[in-house]
Amino acid sequence: MTDLSHSFAVCAYKESPHLRACLESLKNQTAKSPFFIATSTPNEYIEGLAKEFDVPVYASKRESGIGRDWNFALSCASSDLVTIAHQDDLYEPDYAKSIIEYSKAAKEPIIFFTDYGELRADQKVYDSNLLNVKRKINALLKPKAFWHSKFMRNRTLSIGCAICCPSVCINRERFPDFRFSETMTCDLDWDAWSRLARQKGSFVYIPQPLMLHRIHEESETTKQLSDGKRFAEDFEMFCRYWPKPIAKLLMKRYSGSADSNQLD
């Protein structure tokens, strides 16, 4: 198949002290992929880092919101494949290289996603109950024979979202009009993969931990859990796959996974 181009769209918000490290990790990719910054909160800090790394900044005129910001970032990309890089996270040097290599082996790819680790107090963590459960779920999509299986990917999504959002690379060449939900605030990634899972093509799982998701007090994940926003949307997503009584039972188990995103 024709080689697909790849880029990173860095979603920057306000003045994150971790943005520089994220940009450094993209600059240090072994397979060079262009990257740019997209923001709904333009400021001198972001502009200064963009100048330092010699990358463009695109400023949204819309009000800030997770779905709106991600959709704006996607709209700024000109490559076939786009990874929305979250400003607090890090990408291992071979992330882009692996995406390109797997894209050459995949039939009608929809998304690519990788295994991942966590950053806690700047320490890399690869072994936790939640990470291990997610690996077991995603292992069902590890065989190439299952990449193209709608049944298999929908079964994995029916028991929760084991796909780490910042590890995902979206094939916009096939889905130029794809948009994240702008009404959800927590499960917009699960909702997105659920909608894309119905399409013809491949969900490509790369089992190497090629990015690091930062867990800290100011992260959006931690805020959502402390505010209790997530649980109504979790229930909505489970009801997409199961009758309400079963969805309620799954919720009891799934809610325990939230503990892995707490700092204490």
Image (tube, rainbow, N blue to C red):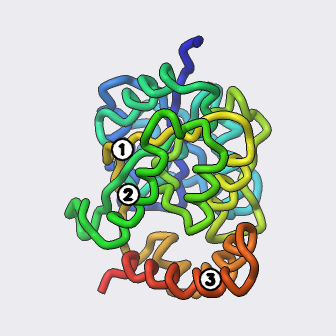
Q: Position of residue 170 (x, y in %)?
A: 60, 39
Q: Which mark is residue 231?
A: 3
Nearest the eye: 33 or 204: 204
Instruction: Identify which residue is drawn at 30% across, 41% down.
Output: 92
40 horizontally vs 90: left or right:
right
Q: Which mark is residue 207?
A: 1
Q: Position of residue 32 (x, y in %)?
A: 39, 24
Please name the amino acid that badge 2 sits on: Arg
Please name the amino acid that badge 1 sits on: Pro
Q: Residue furthest top?
A: 2
Q: In front of the other: label 2 or label 3?
A: 2
| Distance between mark 2 and mark 1 Cα atoms | 8 Å
Which image quarter is the C terminus in? bottom left
- Position of residue 73 relative to residue 244, above or below, is above
Instruction: Identify which residue is drawn at 35% across, 48% down.
Output: 211
- Position of residue 93 relative to residue 44, above or below, is above
Q: In front of the other: label 1 or label 3?
A: 1
For label 2, the SS is: helix
Which image quarter is the N terminus in? top right
Task: Compare marks 2 and 1 and give the one earlier in the sequence.
Answer: 2
| Badge 1 vs badge 3, beta-carbon distance below 8 Å | no
Kindly tell me whether residue 48 is visible in this rendering: no
Q: Quadrant of residue 2?
A: top right
For label 3, the SS is: helix
Task: Compare marks 1 and 3 and give the one earlier in the sequence.
Answer: 1
Instruction: Identify which residue is drawn at 52% across, 31% down.
Output: 7
Q: Quadrant of residue 95?
A: top left
Q: Which residue is mark 2?
A: 135
Q: Position of residue 154 (x, y in %)?
A: 64, 55
